[in-house]
Amino acid sequence: MDALGIALIVIGLALVCAGLVFWRWASRTQPADLDGDGPGELRGLIDALDQAESSARSVRPRLDQIRREDSSK
């Protein structure tokens, strides 16, 4: 039973060390990607949403303009 405990500890330490080695190797070889599709994909999506919001804002009338029109009738 003692041998099993020691073996599990050794295997656990080996897995942790291997994970640290591969994590450092992967961080040096691949740049960090926050969105997974490339460095500019998330920024492009945010810009497109901002542009769509601003164009929609210029098309639809504001609530206070509608109230003024309704009160003048």
Image (spheres, rainbow, N blue to C red):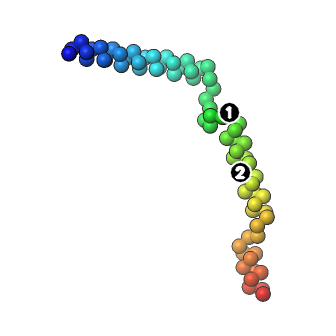
Q: Residue furthest bottom?
A: 73
Q: Indicate the amino acid at tag 1.
A: Gly
Is residue 6 rendered to the left or right of residue 21?
A: left
Q: Residue furthest top?
A: 3
Q: Residues within 10 Å of mark 2 (few under 14, many from 20)?
A: few
**Image quadrant in which you'd find residue 56:** bottom right
Q: CA distance from mark 1 to mark 2?
A: 18 Å
Where is residue 50? Give x, y as percent: 72, 52
Residue plotted at (72% across, 57% down): 53
Where is residue 55? Give x, y as percent: 78, 58
Residue 30, compared with residue 45, is above or below; it is above
Dot 1: element: loop
Is residue 23 rendered to the left or right of residue 48?
A: left
Q: Mark 1 sits on what residue?
A: 38
Residue 54, compared with residue 30, is above or below; it is below
Dot 2: element: helix
Where is residue 35? Give x, y as percent: 62, 37
Q: Indicate the amino acid at tag 2.
A: Leu
N-terminal label among 1 and 2? 1
Residue plotted at (36% across, 19% down): 12
Q: Mark 2 sits on what residue?
A: 49
**Image quadrant in which you'd find residue 16:** top left
Q: Residue furthest left?
A: 1
